[in-house]
């Protein structure tokens, strides 16, 4: 039977993508690892590789098609000894992609619904993983759901033929959905907290009805904006934020920056660089996390992950949204290395050419709006980070030193903290360490 090639999930949050280009055509032979198509997501353009050898028997999704759901068949691969006649048998039974066979059992499992309640999730792919009292789910999805206490009958399936897969259960877990209806409120004795149901957003029809027709233009949401909306809603609903503010004097830093850049080879020569104030900020935050390691952490229900390296995300504004590529091991890199890496990642981010590993993970991030004239602001934490540093502009201001009023260049910085991981005193220590590096930049080179 032909093997379906499915639209891959190129990131944990990806739900759909655009099939930008086919690199192979029907009748072409492919080997495992051959690039067969280009997929555009909200973050990047990536190549899809064949997972087995065979012949492209049928292309099921045309080039340029947008909104192709993850796990949707995009082509059929004929194996050895199969010809076009074998394509007719496809669809006679729910297909299983070759690479997923180890993780997804074809046998459906009957799951009793909590209190006999009907499935609450909307239909997906025609089945939503449910057929009467039967729930179609992979063994891994069932195991994760059991451990998390989730009711599979209320989980929306996005796998082949509406099958419930790992991604569906993890998403339901993250958003607090699919909890058994009979679950009691958490006791005060330290049991796991059950997320409370949040007020629903105003329906689109009600919002649009508030405005007179012809007075607005409806711009459809692209994948990037949908992902931003989902992630920031998740952050504000599930992460208890608090903020700490500090002003840093940066006159010494500005002088150091000028002197460092004077030592750079000329543009175009090997090793050329141009260090920015933001590069100092990234380096200082990475070193501060090493000095205050308890803040270099990520919250999970199993426990707090304490990270060894300082992996710092850098918010990059692009048309229609933003990316946060991650600089790995900041504490070990020179300012020139950080500068060149940030420039490279930012340029590729604007072209949507970042690979998933370049923008996933990390422990904190820097969002700098100083170049736009913003004095200070609060940033929303980007899960799974525990902190984010919002940086305002550097400006000459009157400050008091001793009994004298003097002019100094100061920069406002606001640290948003996840209170589940970083308490007030811990956040203050991190911000204090950061301020020390910024105001004495020579210590970054020690």
Image (cartoon, grey):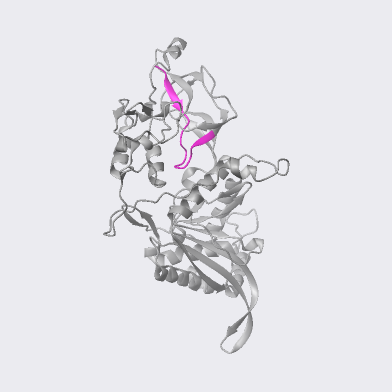
Query: In the visual, does 24 lie left or right of 373?
Result: left
The magenta segment is 1-17
Picture quarter containing residue 252? bottom right
Q: Quadrant of the N terminus?
A: top left
Q: Residue at x 39, y 56 (%)?
A: 298
Query: For the view shown, which residue lies furthest in the left direction?
Result: 189
Query: For the view shown, which residue lies furthest in the bottom direction?
Result: 403
- Residue 353 visible in this rendered orientation of the protein: no
Across the whole image, how many numbered discs are drawn on residues? 0
The verdict on residue 15 being magenta is yes
Picture quarter containing residue 427? bottom left
Q: Nearer the viewer, residue 433 or 193?
A: 193
Query: In the visual, does 212 lie left or right of 225?
Result: right
Residue 355 versus residue 194 in the image, above or below: above
Q: Nearer the viewer, residue 338 or 95?
A: 95
Picture quarter containing residue 400? bottom right
The verdict on residue 337 being magenta is no
Q: Main secondary structure of the magenta part?
A: loop
Measuring from the top left, give residue 370's x and y in whole percent. 62, 63
Residue 52 versus residue 230 in the image, above or below: above
- Residue 20 visible in this rendered orientation of the protein: yes
Q: Residue at x 44, y 60 (%)?
A: 332
């Amino acid at each position: 039977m032909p093997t379906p090639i499915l639209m891959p999930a190129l990131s944990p949050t990806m739900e759909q993508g655009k099939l930008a280009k086919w690199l192979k055509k029907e009748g072409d032979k492919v080997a495992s690892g051959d690039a067969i198509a280009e997929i555009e997501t909200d973050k990047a353009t990536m190549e899809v590789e064949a997972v087995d050898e065979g012949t492209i028997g049928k292309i099921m999704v045309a080039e340029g098609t947008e909104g192709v759901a993850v796990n949707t068949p995009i082509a059929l691969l004929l194996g050895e000894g199969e010809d076009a006649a074998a394509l007719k048998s496809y669809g006679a039974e729910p297909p299983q992609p070759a690479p997923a066979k180890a993780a997804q059992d074809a046998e459906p499992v009957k799951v009793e619904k909590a209190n006999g309640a009907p499935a609450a999730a909307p239909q997906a792919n025609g089945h939503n993983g449910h057929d009467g009292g039967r729930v179609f789910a992979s063994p891994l999805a069932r195991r994760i759901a059991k451990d998390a206490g989730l009711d599979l009958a209320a989980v929306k399936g996005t796998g082949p033929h509406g099958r419930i897969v790992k991604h569906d259960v993890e998403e339901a877990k993250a958003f607090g959905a699919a909890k058994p209806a009979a679950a009691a409120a958490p006791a005060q004795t330290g049991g796991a907290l059950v997320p409370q149901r949040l007020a629903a957003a105003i329906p689109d029809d009600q919002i649009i009805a508030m405005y007179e027709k012809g007075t607005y233009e409806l711009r459809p949401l692209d994948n990037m904006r949908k992902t931003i909306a989902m992630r920031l809603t998740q952050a504000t609903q599930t992460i208890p934020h608090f903020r700490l503010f500090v002003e840093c004097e940066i006159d010494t830093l500005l002088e150091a920056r000028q002197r460092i850049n004077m030592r750079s080879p000329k543009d175009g020569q090997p090793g050329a660089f141009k260090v920015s104030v933001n590069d100092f900020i990234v380096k200082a935050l990475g070193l501060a996390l090493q000095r205050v390691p308890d803040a270099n952490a990520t919250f999970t229900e199993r426990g707090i992950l304490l990270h060894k390296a300082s992996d710092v995300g850098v918010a990059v504004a692009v048309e229609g949204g933003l990316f946060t590529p991650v600089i790995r091991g900041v504490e070990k890199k020179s300012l020139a290395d950080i500068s060149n890496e940030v420039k490279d990642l930012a340029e590729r981010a604007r072209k949507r050419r970042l690979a998933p590993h370049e923008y996933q993970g990390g422990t904190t991030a820097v969002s700098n709006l100083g170049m736009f004239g913003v004095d200070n602001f609060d940033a929303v934490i980007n899960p799974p980070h525990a902190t984010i540093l919002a940086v305002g502009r550097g400006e000459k201001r009157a400050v008091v030193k001793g009994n004298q009023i003097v002019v100094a260049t100061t920069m406002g910085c606001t640290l948003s903290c996840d209170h589940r991981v970083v308490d007030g005193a811990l956040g203050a220590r991190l911000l204090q360490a950061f301020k020390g590096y910024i105001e004495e930049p020579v210590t970054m080179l020690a």
